[in-house]
Image: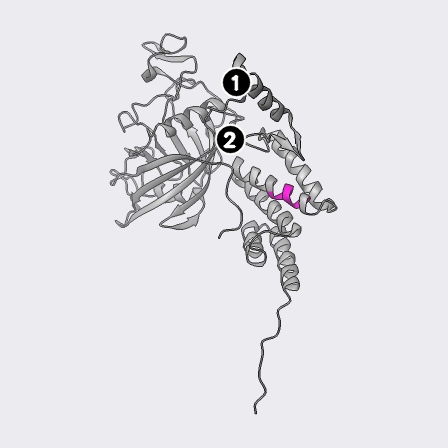
């Protein structure tokens, strides 16, 4: 009789250890996504401290590039879990503390909503919550909620867009945008409000310039002449320009956002379009393509970053989506390739449309997909 053959037994621990080693090498080579793929395959449930530590460091690297508050918090959560899983691992503890220091410098809190308890003990935030409940009959709840600002809009923005390329092929894409609440809090707030109100749904990118940017957000006229801020910030459009006054506090059509020149115009940045006055930004915005626009630093208010994208169901960078849109066919091109330049109408032959823009939870999902 022939001898029965059997497959050699796989040593799961060895496979996992090899995956950790390969993931760390990938991370050192500047390949955080490759590192995460290796970890997902070897430890799909994220059950081991080494997995969590390397995953946290990988997401941290992604956050540095994307400037996404969501990814910073996701990285912190992974490293925090790594420390909990193995409190003796000094590497995890050191990385976690370094990340928290970086987040503090960037003005990013570790939690969107501070925890009520830590190791069974109420945190200062938790004590406030308990106190608010105890004195609710005396109006304490109102004070508590006012202090916490839990009615403020938070999170990233997911924008779904559609366009037709120069070959006549229709495309659908997505752009994930994080907002800079530290350097441009008023612009971030105004943008979130307009998104939350659904004002950008169906609006076109009315000005497109290859090797520069794509501009949209005029939900009033769709041609670059309209739009307004999401709330009143103390400035009004008047007959003589923009003034710091409360005369338009009840007329949203005259609301504008004052200048916040804190962020640079790197590739993928979202910034506020405006007229001649520095403080005249309304609802219009532009997304900078891969060329970047550093000449606009200190002149226009950048307030976020397109950190992820998708084209026809395939994940890519936010910059790739912006580039694809910036290269559509122009109505009056001044070059043989047919793209829009700034000395032309900068209007596309086929409309580039924001199909929808919604707020999404910036806490992020687990790094391992199911």
Figure quadrant of the N terminus: bottom right
Q: Nearer the viewer, residue 337 or 349?
A: 349
- Asked if the stretch drawn in magenta spans residue 307, the answer is no
Asked whether 80 falls inside the magenta stretch, the response is yes
Which residue is labeled 1 in the image? Answer: 141
Can you give x and y, in whole percent of width and height, for residue 179 in the image? 48, 31
Q: Between tags 2 and 1, which lies in front?
A: 1
Give how far across and how far down residue 319 sits, in percent: 44, 42
Foreground pick, 196 / 226:
196
Magenta-tinted stretch? 78-83
How far apart in space, not on screen, are marks 2 and 1 (Cα)?
Answer: 40 Å
- The rendered magenta stretch, by its main secondary structure, is classed as helix
Q: Circle 1 sits in a helix, a strand or a loop, which is it?
A: helix
Write the residue at 64% across / 37% down.
Answer: 99
Q: Which residue is mark 2?
A: 264
Give the percent coordinates (x, y) of residue 349: 24, 40
């Amino acid at each position: 009789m022939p001898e029965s053959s059997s497959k050699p037994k796989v040593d799961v621990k060895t496979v996992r250890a090899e995956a950790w080693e390969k993931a760390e090498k990938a991370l050192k080579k500047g390949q955080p996504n490759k590192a995460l793929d290796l970890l997902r395959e070897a430890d799909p449930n994220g059950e081991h401290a080494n997995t969590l530590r390397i995953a946290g460091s990988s997401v941290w690297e992604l956050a540095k590039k994307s400037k996404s508050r969501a990814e910073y918090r996701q990285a912190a959560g992974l490293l925090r879990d790594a420390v909990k899983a193995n409190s003796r691992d000094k590497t995890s503890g050191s990385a976690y503390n370094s990340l928290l220091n970086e987040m503090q410098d960037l003005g990013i809190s570790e939690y969107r909503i501070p925890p009520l308890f830590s190791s069974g003990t109420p945190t200062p935030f938790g004590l406030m919550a308990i106190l608010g409940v105890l004195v609710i009959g005396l109006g304490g709840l109102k004070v508590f909620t006012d202090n916490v600002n839990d009615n403020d809009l938070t999170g990233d923005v997911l924008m779904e867009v559609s366009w037709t390329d120069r070959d006549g092929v229709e495309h659908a894409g997505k752009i994930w945008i994080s907002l800079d609440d530290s350097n441009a809090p008023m612009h971030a707030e105004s943008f979130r409000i307009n998104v939350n109100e659904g004002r950008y749904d169906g609006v076109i990118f009315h000005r497109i310039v290859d090797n520069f940017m794509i501009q949209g957000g005029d939900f009033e006229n769709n041609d670059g002449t309209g739009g307004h801020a999401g709330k009143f910030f103390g400035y009004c459009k008047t007959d003589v320009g923009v003034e710091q006054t409360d005369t338009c506090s009840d007329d949203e059509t005259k609301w504008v956002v004052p200048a916040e020149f804190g962020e640079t115009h790197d590739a993928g940045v979202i910034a506020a379009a405006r007229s001649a006055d520095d403080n005249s930004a309304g609802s219009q915005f532009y997304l900078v393509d891969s060329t970047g626009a550093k000449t606009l630093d200190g002149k226009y208010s950048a307030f976020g970053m397109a950190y992820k994208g998708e084209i026809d169901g395939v994940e890519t960078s936010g910059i790739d989506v912006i580039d694809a849109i910036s290269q559509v066919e122009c109505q009056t091109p001044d070059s043989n390739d047919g793209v829009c330049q700034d000395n032309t109408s900068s209007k596309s032959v086929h409309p580039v449309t924001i199909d929808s823009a919604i707020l999404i939870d910036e806490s992020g999902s687990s790094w391992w997909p199911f």
